[in-house]
Image (tube, rainbow, N blue to C red):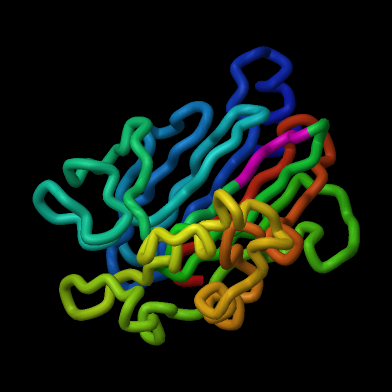
Amino acid sequence: MMIREIFLVCLLGACTCHQLHIANRCSHTVWVGILGNSIPDGGGYMLSAGSSRTTNVPNHWSGRVWGRTGCYGNKCETGDCGGGKIQCNGAGGAPPATLAEITFDAGGLRDYYDVSLVDGYNLQMSMSPRDGYRSGSGHYYCSRAGCNTDLNKNCPNELAVYGTGGVVACMSACLAFNLDKYCCRDSYNTPQKCPPFSYSQTFKDACPEAYSYAYDDQASTFTCVGNSVGSTSYDIIFCG
């Protein structure tokens, strides 16, 4: 659908205005999970290796996309949303899982997006604008967010999650140890009191364009301004 057609659909009130073009470039199947202030496509679907699918979301949509792996029987090895379901239907994914997060039309035509490892990592993942945005400059303006490094290969032993074939995910320090100093809570609940630490720095060194821990906002949040209401669309790519 062309941008002008999307805009007309919005004016008519049947708005599925923004688009997420989700592609699987991994060598294995990925089961997509989607969660937000509305639930498009039943909250998920299966993408075989090399396949892609477009998900439409309304104006002001805010949510996340993640990949589930090893989904057989009634459970996924990573990112499971309960019962091994193809459609998550409003259920979130079990951490650790790499997340692509976006808020459309925040304060006008501005989108905010990031790829987060705050809850840990399971898959390489990237997110970048495709079209419908205004030109601009700056490292965090309409640029690619993501993690291109396979953290599972270098995950510290104490953070590693094992499954079929070895390490299938890498926990965050907060998830692994549940300590305030890693979770940035209670007496550590400000950026000053919760600066980067050794585990978060390991994630940041491997994936500089991804959120490494709770207060990594300044070096992880990307933004893009649309040409008009509902014009922007994004690519979300697993293993790419």
Determine which quarter of the picture holds residue 232: top right
Determine which quarter of the picture holds residue 146: bottom right
Give the x, y percent position of residue 75.
16, 51
Residue 187 relative to residue 120: left or right: right
What residue appears at the point 69 percent right and 54 percent down from the top-left corner?
190
Residue 101 relative to residue 219: left or right: left
Q: Which residue, as the protein is rendered here, is positioned at the far top?
A: 12
Asked if the stretch drawn in magenta spans residue 8, the answer is no
Q: Toward the viewer: 83 or 202?
A: 202
What residue appears at the point 55 percent right and 59 percent down from the top-left corner?
116
Give the x, y percent position of residue 5.
69, 29
Residue 205 relative to residue 73: left or right: right
What residue appears at the point 63 percent right and 72 percent down from the top-left corner?
196
Q: Which residue, as the protein is rendered here, is positioned at the far front?
A: 187
Q: Which residue, as the protein is rendered here, is positioned at the far bottom?
A: 154
Give the x, y percent position of residue 165.
18, 79
Where the N terminus falls, by quadrant? top right
Position of residue 145 relative to residue 39, above or below, is: below
Magenta region: 102-106
What residue appears at the point 58 percent right and 75 percent down from the top-left corner?
197
Asked if the stretch drawn in magenta spans residue 104, the answer is yes
Number of labels in the image equals 0
Main SS of the magenta part reads strand
Give the x, y percent position of residue 159.
35, 74
Q: Which residue, as the protein is rendered here, is positioned at the far left?
A: 73
